[in-house]
Image (cartoon, rainbow, N blue to C red):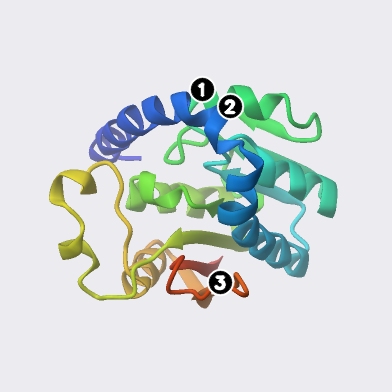
Amino acid sequence: MSAMQQATARAFNGLVTQGWNRAARLYNTPILQRLAYRPPQDEIIAQLALSRAQRIADVGCGTGILAARIAADLAPEAVYGCDASAGMSKQARSRSDRVEWRHRQAEDLGFPDAALDAVVSTHAFHFFAHQAALAEFHRILIPGGLLAIVLNNPTTRFARALQPAPMQDLAYFPAPSEMRALIEAAGFTVTEQRAVQRYPIPPALVPDVLTVARRG
């Protein structure tokens, strides 16, 4: 990671992790998990099952619900739950002993080159320094490795203009076309991009999008 990327990552994570350290207990609320987070996690589980990945990192894992599900449902060789928030990481460590929990930033995960078969992330990528995080994901994935990200991607091409400029340094939600461009610029090939299935809730009410790619 370049010095500029490191500085950007520090700025993002310093602001974001303070809030999530305090919000860890609220995030773990069953009704919030069921309504907001379970559908995208189901999508990620399905993608991982199809890929048969054996070494998987859940980046921005929060309190570890998805990472623990991956370990329990798919029983891969290794699952890593990574989060920059100390509060979230503390909650996660008590969830499963089948996951290796790491208190790490998305832009500096600490894995060797080509160490993983899959990197996944649900509703956290907007907090990352996008280019630096994608460069890190590309570095740690094997050639052909799976990248699957769920994020609220506003459908309009004016996504940046619609988000307050001061907030863009804290969290930014790219439009689907911009998301695709970011991922492809980092050396991935996008294989699928579609709305998360939340039947009977229409996608317009929760505009999160699954983007799936493979490392070139």
Q: Is residue 120 visible?
A: no
Q: Is residue 190 visible?
A: yes
Measuring 28% from the left and 41% from the top, which residue is drawn there?
5
The N terminus lies in which quarter of the figure? top left
CA distance separating discs 3 and 2 = 31 Å
CA distance separating discs 3 and 1 = 33 Å
Between marks 3 and 1 in the image, the one whose residue lies nearer the viewer? 3
Q: What type is the residue that disc 2 sits on?
A: Ser
Badge 1 marks a residue whose secondary structure is helix
Measuring 41% from the left and 65% from the top, which residue is drawn there?
183
Give the residue number, with chain letter if any, for mark 1.
86
Measuring 58% from the left and 39% from the top, which residue is drawn there?
112
Specify the label residue 201 is tagged with: 3
Give the residue number, with chain letter if any, for mark 2.
89
Q: Position of residue 176 (x, y in %)?
A: 37, 72
Disc 3 or 2, which lies upstream in sequence?
A: 2
Disc 3 or 1, which lies upstream in sequence?
A: 1
